[in-house]
Image (cartoon, rainbow, N blue to C red):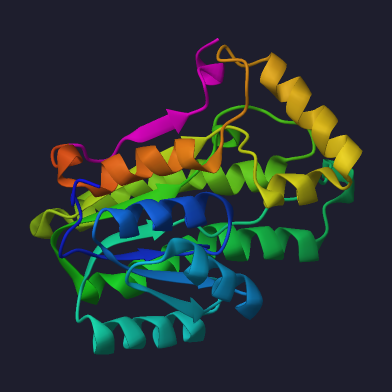
Amino acid sequence: MTGRLNGKVALVTGGSSGIGLAAAKRFAVEGATVYITGRKPEALDAAVAAIGGNVTAVRADSSVVADLDKLYAKIREKSGKLDIVFANAGIAAFVPLSAITEEHYDSIVDTNLKGVVFTVKQAVPLLSDGASIILTSSTAGYKGMEAFSVYSATKAAIRQLARSWILDLKARKVRVNVVSPGMVDTPAIDALAGDPNAAVGMKAHVASQIPLGRIAEPDDVAAAVLFLASDDAAYINGIELPVDGGAGQI
């Protein structure tokens, strides 16, 4: 522990598992007061126990503005400010073009795009000057992937949000950066594959295409998020940081 986030207040949406949980752990270890959100109370309880430190879990769906209003009311009451927002909540599903339904489109766009927009928009009144916002995109946002078009489109849009928001927030010197993981070994990836055998095969195939020879662990991405959240990245603004083992470079 180096205390890089001592005195900071951080929010991690989708903080009950995967990348969000790993980032929340790192924030707490570095001294931040941490708020996490998720949809499942039992998962949030388990996450609080795993994170330790000064952490508060709030059941909230990022795509529901009323839930965000309650979340920020709690943060305002307990902490009075936000220094770090990691807008990380997201969902994915493989659906080919011929099978896209309105329900599929709405569920992906509502969580991955609307949820990010309103998570950040509603946070602005609480942000301290010089705050750090990190958005989770994906290498799928700039690479074509079969049966992944709606998800990929939402992740491409995240990149453009950051470019615009650094201008909207420039008067307060708020930084907005994007982290773009490749495949990460999380429960969400297992669910995406559909069954354990398919998940093993999918991970092995993807790993074979990565120069480092493996897919990412959640903490690989969390380390990059911590860097962007900290004062070590005080002059880094508007970037997209791939965390993909080099896969996007070949």
Q: Is residue 194 left or right of residue 86?
A: right
Q: In what quadrant of the picture does the C terminus appear?
A: top right
Q: Is residue 82 left or right of residue 156?
A: left
In the depicted structure, whether residue 192 falls above or below residue 49: above
| Labels in figure, total | 0
Say if the magenta span includes residue 241: yes
Res 133 quadrant in image = bottom left
Q: Position of residue 76 (x, y in %)?
A: 26, 84
Specify start and end residues of the magenta stretch as a single range: 236-250
Q: Residue at x 42, y 88 (%)?
A: 70
Q: Position of residue 21 (x, y in %)?
A: 50, 57
Instruction: Pick the residue in front: 233 or 31.
Output: 31
Res. 163 visible in picture = no
Q: Residue at x 55, y 32 (%)?
A: 139
Q: Residue at x 62, y 15 (%)?
A: 213
In the depicted structure, whether residue 9 falls above or below residue 133: below
Q: Is residue 144 left or right of residue 130?
A: right
Q: Residue at x 82, y 43 (%)?
A: 193
In the depicted structure, whether residue 214 falls above or below residue 167: above
Say if the magenta span includes residue 8: no
In the depicted structure, whether residue 127 falls above or below residue 204: below
Q: Position of residue 156 (x, y in %)?
A: 52, 41
Q: Position of residue 123 (x, y in %)?
A: 31, 72
Res. 119 visible in picture = yes
Q: Is residue 194 left or right of residue 11?
A: right
